[in-house]
Amino acid sequence: MAYEMLITEISDYVGVIRLNRPDALNALNAQLLRELADVLGQWDTDDDVRAIVLTGSEKAFAAGADIKEMSEKSFVDMFGSDYFTNETEAVSRVRKPIIAAVSGFALGGGCELAMMCDFIICSDTAKFGQPEINLGVMAGIGGTQRLTRLVGKSKAMEMNLTGRFMDAEEAERAGLVSRVVPAKDLMDDAMKTAGKIAEKSQIAVMAVKEAVNRSYETTQREGLLFERRVFHSLFATEDQAEGMAAFTEKRSPKFRDS
Ligand code: HXC
């Protein structure tokens, strides 16, 4: 499938997806999200991709769902199509880690898309917000749920009720992003981080992703049990033997994803 709204590239086992609708600040429409779901689905089973970086432009990661596309929709259109659900669930289904590299605006669906990724690295120019309230609606793909879990009720409630933006410094303080870097270093940093993950055992990487995500889906007791069982099961892998032998022999491990 040729992509019109994405630029994609694989380099050194890192797949990079750049949202590319510059005239609309990367607003998310049905086609863009279909393309995104398509490439993520392919890369999830592509051995040349071991980590993924999702990014936008310097001015905008994505300024939200496409308001012009949405403005004509009725309740029946939205409910009947379960608007964006298939596409966004495709993002959550990916088993390889996805880093959101955010510069500029990450608003509405853009903020929600960044939060669907496994973690966010942002530039010092980043601005996060859920301004749907200003359009007479509300967040629809995670802005009241993931944001609340990430930054707590007070900030999530204020942002969703007032539509105010959070800058990079506040986003780091609140736990929305893992790190803030100067804008000029953003891609370099995200690529290095993804590259580091790409060197690990993919079995262990997928296990970590499942276990951390489990902490959002279940009680702590169940989450701890899940973690423990997955940890135990990694002792059935050759990568565990190799990783521990390499440590003892004071050399770098050679993981074979087995
Ligand atoms: C469609 C958008 C857009 C959007 C920007 N554009 N955001 N088009 N949908 N979400 C377009 C503008 O219309 C304009 O096109 C061009 O991008 C540049 O934007 P400007 O507004 O001229 O830029 P600027 O003055 O720098 O302001 C930037 C901005 C502002 C603050 C980000 O564009 C803005 O407020 N955008 C909307 C943000 C928003 O409300 N997002 C939430 C959407 S609802 P033209 O053709 O005029 O040049 C949502 C629901 C999610 O996300 C739930 C989904 C299920």
Image (cartoon, rainbow, N blue to C red):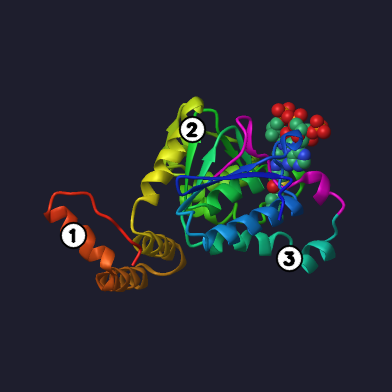
Check residue 82 in the rendering and tell me which mark sits there, or answer none: 3
Q: Are circles 1 and 3 on residues that touch, CB within 8 Å?
A: no
Q: Residues within 10 Å of mark 1 (few under 14, many from 20)?
A: few
Please tell me which residue lies in front, 33 or 12.
12
Above/below status of 148 relative to 175: below
Spot occupied by residue 228 in the image (x, y as percentages of width and height): 28, 70
Q: Is residue 15 left or right of residue 65?
A: left
Element under label 3? loop
Decide whether residue 71 is among the magenta residues.
Answer: yes
Spot occupied by residue 244 in the image (x, y as percentages of width and height): 18, 59
Residue type, label 3: Asp
Residue type, label 2: Leu
Please tell me in which quarter of the rendered image ligand 1 is found: top right
Q: Is residue 106 left or right of residue 187?
A: right
- The image quadrant that residue 238 belongs to is bottom left
Range of magenta residues: 54-72
Instruction: State how far apart marks 1 and 3 are (Cα).
Output: 47 Å
Above/below status of 253 relative to 17: below
Residue 204: tell me if it is visible. Answer: yes
- The image quadrant that residue 129 belongs to is top right
Element under label 1? helix
Instruction: State how far apart marks 1 and 2 are (Cα).
Output: 33 Å
Residue 133: tell me if it is visible. Answer: no
Decide whether residue 146 is among the magenta residues.
Answer: no
Q: Residue at x 51, y 27 (%)?
A: 183
Q: Are circles 2 and 3 on residues that touch, CB within 8 Å?
A: no
Instruction: State how far apart marks 2 and 3 are (Cα).
Output: 34 Å
Q: Please tell me which of labels 1 and 3 falls first in the chain.
A: 3
Q: Please tell me which of labels 1 and 2 falls first in the chain.
A: 2
According to the picture, the residue beneath numbered tag 2 turns out to be 186
Residue type, label 1: Met
